[in-house]
Amino acid sequence: MFKTKEEIIVIQAEAKEPIQTRAVFWSHDKGTAKMLFKLRKDGTSQALAEGTIVPILLKFNSETAENGVGRHIYHAVIEDAVNGIVSIILEDNILGYQGRVDGSIYIELPDSRSLDTAGRFTFHIKRSPIDEDVPELEDYYWQGFGEIMEQYHESIAEIKSEAKELLDSLTADVTTAQNKVTTLEQSITTANTNLNARIDEISKKIDDKDVFTKAESSANVIDQIVGKESVELSATCDFIGKIADSVVENPNFAQYGITTGVPTKLVTGNKETTASYAKLATVDGELRDGTNPGVNVVRYERLSYDILHYAKKLLGEQFFVDSGANDTASQVEVLKTLDITGINRVWGFGSSAGGNKLITKIYGSTGWTNEVSSTASVVTELTQNVTNDEMKTLIQSDGFIHVFIYTEPSDVTTGSRVVLDCVMFDLKIKVSANDYIKSMIASNHVTNLATQAEAETATDNKY
């Protein structure tokens, strides 16, 4: 069982910002913290030839490391060479670190060529509450060194085995035996020399690379399902790339406004601007700050996440069609039959006549529910875990979930203020591997190919 984070890495020469994966691993995730990457180039999966090595470099701040930066290098496991899917499992020696980790992906081809994929990404490691002692953090670690040492020890073991057999079989020709022993000792010396040369060569390659100059575009990566009874798919509903009055780039939307007193029903406010969406997209200190004065005035932010849209991206439209669901309402009913959970996440704080308080709720069939609040005076993360049973009542007939964020009422001297840094809703869907594989086959099956006769008589011969 793994805690998996997936990303698409686009091989390109265009410089972009690193992927903010938002992944958080903990010191207690020993042997279970897995990152999976799908390599793509020119819009298609990048196949990996036999013998290809995919080094992944992780960098982190360290007061004891040279230049204040520690470096861990992994050789990624190639899980699917045809579709360019690779993964790493974080070693215990990095779980002792707390903070941001910057990663980059490279490819070493079998013909001695190599390339920088321009794949840059970040994630975080935190201390698990259960851990009093955590693994010691090593400033420098290279997984390839262990692999070479293993090969080296195997070679030495074979040489020693041959030497033992030779010595056991010696009878009278001591001079001949001594010559062979000398030859074996020279082989060991040569193996040692080759090992050191290989280590120096790889270290130079790593030192020559700059890991902070390029980046890649990002998208969700489909889980690999091999030998599993079920699969958990995940997506993050957020406002990254959102343009006001458009659902093409991002289907979610937000509104802001005021009510008289604490609201009891779903209200409609003013549309957010593109600039405000950018402030709500990531945890970066760019704040969406709104204050309203008056007596008994409540400032609010309403977030609407298109859960059905993300479910169809994960499962494919055909998954719902095969269940007889051809319109939004019926597809929502199919969605509610699945094992679906979520986490509402809000970074912010609020203030009013009553002091500091920020409240978040989710609108359901019985009104506002799942209340969580914070009395912090600075930006703080609030989370609401939503169970499968709760999701069934919170997803509306149009496929949306509505989140309401507000503070307490104002008075004649103190306004009602809501300050937000970032908002998002993490969606998880668990389906059987069999159903998921069928949905992927159906989504990618071509049904509109022309016959040979139709193709020969058509004006477009690409079908």
Image (cartoon, grey):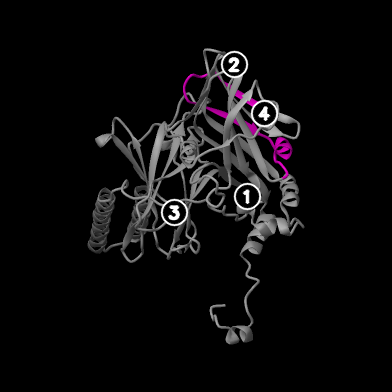
Select label 3 or label 2 by which is in front: 2
Q: Earlier in the sequence, mark 2 or mark 4?
A: 2
Is residue 344 rendered to the left or right of residue 102? right
Secondary structure of residue under mark 2? loop
Select label 2 or label 1 by which is in front: 2
Give the class, few, some or many, for how many residues have Cα within 10 Å of label 1's Cα (few <14, many ≥20).
some
Label 2: which residue?
295
The residue that appears at 68% across and 45% down in the rendered structure is 399
Select label 4 or label 3 by which is in front: 4
Label 4: which residue?
370
Label 1: which residue?
309
Secondary structure of residue under mark 3? strand
Query: Is 161 situated above or below 338?
Result: below
Amino acid, disc 1: His
Label 3: which residue?
9
Is residue 113 rendered to the left or right of residue 379? left
Cβ–Cβ under 8 Å for marks 3 and 1: no
The residue that appears at 66% across and 42% down in the rendered structure is 400
Amino acid, disc 4: Asn
Quadrant (top left/top right/bottom left/bottom right) for the C terminus: bottom right
- The magenta region covers 369-397
Q: Where is residue 292 in the image (x, y as percent from the top left)?
A: 53, 23
Q: Where is residue 22 in the image (x, y as percent from the top left)?
A: 48, 39
Mark 4–mark 1 distance (CA, rounded to whole Å): 23 Å
Mark 2–mark 1 distance (CA, rounded to whole Å): 40 Å
Amino acid, disc 3: Ile
Cβ–Cβ under 8 Å for marks 2 and 1: no
Q: Earlier in the sequence, mark 2 or mark 1?
A: 2
